[in-house]
Amino acid sequence: MSASALTMMIIAIVIIGGGLLVSAVTLMTHPDEPED
Amino acid sequence: MTTRETWGTRAGFILAAAGSAIGLGNIWRFPGEAYQYGGGAFLLPYLFAILTAGIPLLLLEYTIGRKYRLGPPSSFRSLYRPAEGIGWWQNAIAFFLATFYAVIIAWALSYMFFSPSLAWGDDAGAFFGVEYLQAGEPLDFFEYRPAMLGALAAVWAVVLLIMAGGVRKGLELANRICIPLLLVLFGIVVVRALTLEGAVDGLNAFFTPRWDKIGDPEIWLAAYAQVFFSLSIGMGTMIAYSSYLRRNSELSTTAVTVGFANSSFELLAGIGVFSVLGFMSSDAGVPIDQLVGTGGGVAFVTFPTILSQMPGGAFVGVLFFATLVVAGITSLISMVIVPFSSFEDRFGWSRKKSVLVLGLPMAAFSLLIYPTANGSSMVDAVDFAVSGYGLVLGGLATIVLAFATGKIKALAAEANRTSMLKLGNVWYACLALTAAVLVFTLYKSIQGQIADLSDPAVANELIYINWGVGGAMILFGAIMTAVLWRRPLPQRAADESVAETV
């Protein structure tokens, strides 16, 4: 695989997959407040 | 006073919203668009569009849905009384979209059963057009194709069964089963694709950035269009889904999670599809750019051709078309919920009544119009009326309404009440930018169709059907608004936000 393609693939996976992971973990550690 | 069913868990809502966004378009549209508009370089405007348009607009629809806890027409009426028509118009969009989307799922279901024997033989194009669709002229109505009819009836039976279960035992349960299943099925397809000879060539084609394209406005417009069409925004789906949220549900990080889940699946689809195209290119000596496409032809012609030549192609075919069926079903139920929630809220219908009075006629319309000799032409004509104009106008109308009524700050405050990421000036700016992009997209669509009218290669009848469907949807919205003008909105227990405004 060419260096430029490999670099773009890694960047895409890190940003998109990382974004999903961080947001999912953030949600899991912050439960909704109970209903009034 | 009435009470409203809610999602059982936050995860249930996220899976359902992601299931709605992850659909057929992710698998065949995104890889082709990315390749056409700069390969790896496309990912930059694509990411920019997710952050500046996709997630902000998702958040706007989530906030409207959770604030008013009503289906789209009643939610829009709560924002501004004459705007109820926008919600009914979105009902018409969801209706038409659902009726033809089910047809494509039916095609995938048929192909799932064709895969074990690789029934398309050496000429997948002829098999699809001549043997399966038996495509005729654009105006050959009511000449039915039994194989397609049976598959379509099966799809609608499953969908109506899910809908009959309500929010928790229907939508939530279905998505809790389907989304993990989807990931497993497609994961196996991608792993198999990556181990094929020539897969690296495909990945090179997909990811190699062509930076010379980055300054082209068209690539940015394509990125916004991809994000917009793939996130199920603009047709009331997300308003309907979020209307079943609890009042203290988190919104902003939820929207970010759904947006990135959708993009992660698109990226996975790109890797899988291009690995397979790389194999085909290497095996048959056909350049990759001649194999890439953005329409159903990729799934029903190019892929079957490749499966015939691939070791284990029959097994991969079953998994691939099963993936399309599962992804399609989770999206289809999110379209059907729009009219269900709208009529249940406005007329106090039970879910059972909605299935009988709305669901069955939707299925009947779909079965009457599409599994016919001109079915694929009708799919194209209605598709453009709905996704070429309807979704764009729906998204635009939602943004304009939020700003023009002066409610945008109240909506931000409503979202901020429970959100981890606070909304403010950046959100307003993103929505304004999105509105500008949508206006330009609409202008380009109209300009393209006017040019098509004088093109002898384009069937004018289909353009007129397209405009007829568009006009009928707007008329429906206007009539429903007039008929229901004096009918008050339902009063909901412990819900302070339902209020008439003019």
Image (tube, coloured by chain):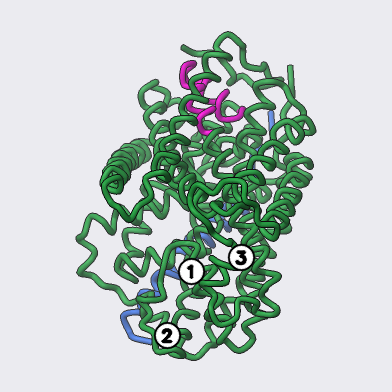
Chain colours: A blue, B green
Sort mark 3 into few (<14), some (14-19) or many (20+) by Cα contacts within 10 Å.
some
User: Which residue is under mark 2?
Assistant: B281
The residue lying toward the viewer, choosing from B451 and B146, is: B146
- Amino acid beneath label 3: Tyr
User: Which residue is under mark 3?
Assistant: B132
Distance between the alpha carbons at the discs numbered 2 and 1: 14 Å
For marks 2 and 1, the one nearer the N-term is 2
Sort mark 1 into few (<14), some (14-19) or many (20+) by Cα contacts within 10 Å.
some
Describe residue B31's horizontal placement relative to residue B481 as left or right.
left
Q: Tell whether position B118 is magenta.
A: no
Q: Tell whether position B79 is magenta.
A: yes
Q: Tag 3's secondary structure?
A: helix
Q: Tag 1's secondary structure?
A: helix
User: Which residue is under mark 1?
Assistant: B298
Tell me if label 2 and label 3 are in contact, CB under 8 Å.
Answer: no
The boundaries of the magenta stretch are B69-90
Chain under label 2?
B
